[in-house]
Amino acid sequence: MPKIQVSGMSCSHCVQSVTKALATVPGVTDIAVSLERNEAIFQAPANLDWERVRAAIEAAGFQAGAHQP
């Protein structure tokens, strides 16, 4: 499963915001955001547009870090 580091989260509301933001990215499903690990794990197609993922996270007010396809 792909994952991406997310910084700037401090509470469960932040987790919900990142989850909702990622849900807007085409093809992203089964999203699990971890406050403790500062990351989001999800299902996505092989041709996922990582820039859209980063943009969605940053539009929600958080910082997108390294990702693993």
Image: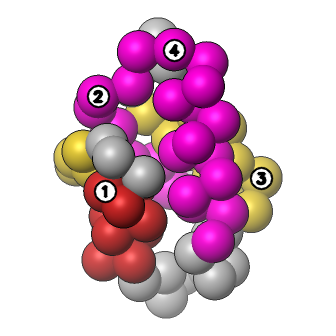
- The quarter in which the C terminus is drawn is bottom left
Image position, residue 60 (x, y; %): 42, 52
**Mark 2 neighbour class, 10 Å CA radius: few under 14, some 14 to 19, many 20 or more:** few
Farthest residue, direction bottom: 47
Mark yes or no: residue 66 visible.
Answer: yes
Q: Specify the label residue 39 is tagged with.
A: none
Q: Amino acid at mark 3?
A: Asp
- Of badges 3 and 2, the one in the foreground is 2
Please say whether residue 22 is one of the residues in the magenta stretch: yes
Q: Earlier in the sequence, mark 3 or mark 1?
A: 3
Is 56 above or below relative to 11?
below
Report the residue marked by disc 3: 30
- Of badges 3 and 4, the one in the foreground is 4
Q: Is residue 55 left or right of residue 39?
A: left
Report the residue marked by disc 2: 8
Report the residue marked by disc 1: 58
Identify the element where label 3 is drawn.
strand
Q: Earlier in the sequence, mark 3 or mark 2?
A: 2
Is 34 above or below relative to 60?
above
Report the span colored magenta.
Answer: 2-24
